[in-house]
Amino acid sequence: MNIKLSATNYGSNMVKLKNILSVFILIQAKIIFIWVVYVIYEYSLY
């Protein structure tokens, strides 16, 4: 019973971790995208 409970708890923690990671990756992708657009814009000015 205890082992089963800890296993489900571990599973939910993994899901939480995956959600946090996916959000972090999305934020990173947005930052990189904005940076790339900014660099292209800067170069187009010169």
Image (tube, grey):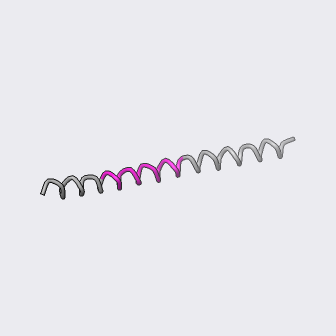
Q: Residue at x 47, y 50 (%)?
A: 23
Q: Nearer the viewer, residue 41 or 19?
A: 19
Q: Nearer the viewer, residue 9 or 39?
A: 9
Q: Left or right: 6 with respect to 29?
A: left
- Snapshot quadrant of residue 12: bottom left
Q: Left or right: 15 with respect to 35?
A: left
Asked if residue 21 lies in the magenta stretch, the reply is: yes
**Rendered-image quadrant of the C terminus:** top right
Percent position of residue 38, x then y? 72, 44
- Snapshot quadrant of residue 3: bottom left
Percent position of residue 33, x then y? 65, 50
Percent position of residue 37, x then y? 71, 48
Please name the predominant secondary structure of the magenta segment in the image.
helix
Percent position of residue 9, x then y? 24, 53
Asked if residue 4 lies in the magenta stretch, the reply is: no
Q: Residue at x 24, y 56 (%)?
A: 7
**Rendered-image quadrant of the N terminus:** bottom left
Q: Residue at x 41, y 54 (%)?
A: 18
Q: Residue at x 53, y 47 (%)?
A: 27
The image shows a total of numbered marks equal to: 0
Residue at far left of view: 1
Residue at far right of view: 46
Q: Nearer the viewer, residue 44 or 23?
A: 23
Q: Nearer the viewer, residue 42 or 12?
A: 12
Q: Which residues are magenta?
A: 13-27
